[in-house]
Image (tube, grey):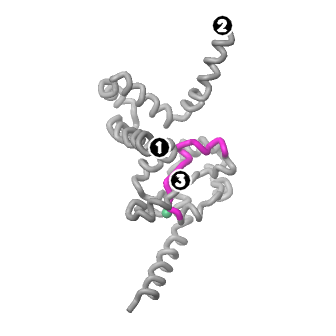
Amino acid sequence: MTACVKTDREALLPVRETLTNPANRHRFIHIILKKLGMYEELGTCLLATNEKGWEENMDRHEKIDNLIRLYRYNIQTATAYVDANGFCAYCGEDVFASEGGFCSAQIDHLFPQSIYPDLKNDPLNCVYSCFRCNQLKRSLDPKELFVSSDITAKDPRTVLTRYRNDLISSFRLRFAPIRAKDKETYHETVSLLRSQ
Ligand SMILES: [Zn+2]
């Protein structure tokens, strides 16, 4: 009997771990409400307690669910795709504008997974990036980049929760001149090779 209880608890451990992540917790509630047929009814009640608004999040979660269910994306990738809506988090390029851009786009880990393996599957640590920006980012550690900043003195999970947008903006500013130079080189090369 005791053994059975222990096994059940052990089986629940991964679920508990998953639910410590706010994004996963929200999605879990969404799924349960849907299964219970109480989605619309309770959604209205939850509206007041939800920062972004229930309707907005409902649409977001529907899209994330569809990507996972229909195309077998994992939750990190699906979340990053939906939140970015096809635009690179760093250079702002519309990655969905061409098939080549879409196929070469990648999920970048703000805190590199090679250094912070615990954050590998955290949706907050994942951003949608074009191939070139991901090349520039590589395993650049935010803590090395912003040595003097208060932000980097904090725990990485706290940074992601409170300063995620600041972190993305800082990387964007750092990559901007390089991306501008890329664009210049691209136009000059095309012009040189294809001019009549
Ligand atoms: Zn980019």
Residue 6 visible from this viewpoint: yes
56 horizontally vs 178: left or right: left
Q: Nearer the viewer, mark 2 or mark 3?
A: 2
**Which residue, given by chain and number where applicable, does mark 3 sit on?**
107
The magenta stretch spans residue 10: no
Instruction: Say few, some or many: other residues with alpha carbon within 10 Å of mark 3 (under 14 / 14 to 19 / 20 or more).
Output: some
**Which residue, given by chain and number where applicable, does mark 1 sit on?**
72
Helix, strand or loop at mark 2: loop
Q: Where does residue 84 sit, x and y in percent of width and height?
A: 43, 52
Q: Where does residue 114 sit, x and y in percent of width and height?
A: 68, 51
**Which residue, given by chain and number where applicable, does mark 2 sit on?**
1
Helix, strand or loop at mark 3: strand
Q: Nearer the viewer, mark 1 or mark 3?
A: 1
Residues drawn in magenta: 117-131
User: What amino acid does circle 2 point to?
Assistant: Met
- Which residue is at a point 41% across and 39% down the rendered structure image? 65
Residue placed furthest toward the top:
1
The magenta stretch spans residue 126: yes
Q: Is residue 32 above or below residue 153?
A: above
Question: Which quadrant of the figure has residue 57?
Answer: top left
User: What amino acid does circle 1 point to?
Assistant: Arg
**Label 2, ligand 1: CB separation under 8 Å:** no
Q: Where does residue 27 sit, x and y in percent of width and height?
A: 45, 34
